[in-house]
């Protein structure tokens, strides 16, 4: 009985460890195509990061841009009332993941808002939903989930 229990425990630890590792590697996988990465990384936020700008970003995140529908109020990628079985790719990004926050430049995130995220359900938001200034405000708010 003890051997069976220990085997199941070991198997569970291996599965959990493999899942955590694969999630970490997914976080580090760039969404910007290789041939556009250098240009995307060269783009920087032209606006000052202020409490007012971040608050405007929060209002957009929760309202007009409807980011919270997929990414949740807390930015953890678990939106309300989602049918996760309909997602074609990875689940929505967890903005509180510090590894992800460090791995992505502001220019890459802006590129994703402008072009969508290939291989995921993230659609483009600029200019259909957000102006460029509004997109930067949303990104300032998104960065606040990682402690910036």
Image (cartoon, rainbow, N blue to C red):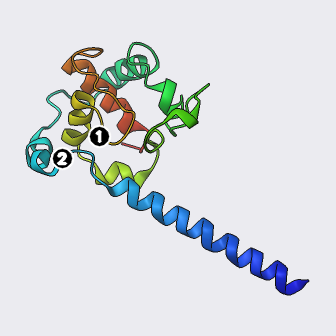
10 vs 90, left or right, is right
Q: How far apart are the two marked residues, 1 and 2, measured between alpha carbons? A: 8 Å
In terms of depth relative to the viewer, which is nearer, 136 or 34?
34
Q: Residue at x 35, y 22 (%)?
A: 57
Residue situated furthest bottom in the rendering:
3
**Where in the figure is residue 125, as x and y percent of width and height?**
29, 22
63 vs 136, left or right, is right
Vertical arrangement, residue 146 with respect to residue 136, above or below? below
Vertical arrangement, residue 34 with respect to residue 70, above or below? below
Vertical arrangement, residue 146 with respect to residue 86, above or below? below
**Where in the figure is residue 102, as x and y percent of width and height?**
32, 53
User: CB of mark 1 within 8 Å of CB of mark 2?
Assistant: yes
Residue 89, quarter of picture: top left
146 vs 39, left or right, is right
Q: Residue at x 11, y 44 (%)?
A: 36
In terms of depth relative to the viewer, which is nearer, 141 or 5?
5
In terms of depth relative to the viewer, which is nearer, 50 or 12?
12
For label 1, the residue is 118
First reached walking from the N terminus: tag 1 or tag 2: 2
Sort mark 2 into few (<14), some (14-19) or many (20+) by Cα contacts within 10 Å: few
Vertical arrangement, residue 53 with respect to residue 84, above or below? above
Considering the image in quadrants, where does the N terminus appear? bottom right
At numbered mark 1, what does the secondary structure look like: helix, strand or loop? loop
At numbered mark 2, what does the secondary structure look like: helix, strand or loop? loop
Considering the image in quadrants, where does the C terminus appear? top left
For label 2, the residue is 33
């Amino acid at each position: 009985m003890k051997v069976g229990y220990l085997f199941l425990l070991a198997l569970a630890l291996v599965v959990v460890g493999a899942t955590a590792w694969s999630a970490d590697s997914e976080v580090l996988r760039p969404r910007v195509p290789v041939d556009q990465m250098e240009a995307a990384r060269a783009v920087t936020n032209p606006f000052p990061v202020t409490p007012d700008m971040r608050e405007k970003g929060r209002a957009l995140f929760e309202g007009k841009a409807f980011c919270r529908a997929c990414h949740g109020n807390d930015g953890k990628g678990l939106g309300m009332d989602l049918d996760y079985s309909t997602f074609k790719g990875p689940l929505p990004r967890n903005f509180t993941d510090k590894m992800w926050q460090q791995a992505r430049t502001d220019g890459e995130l802006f590129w994703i808002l402008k072009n969508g995220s290939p291989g995921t359900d993230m659609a483009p938001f600029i200019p259909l939903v957000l102006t460029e200034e509004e997109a930067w405000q949303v990104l300032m708010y998104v960065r606040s989930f990682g402690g910036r």
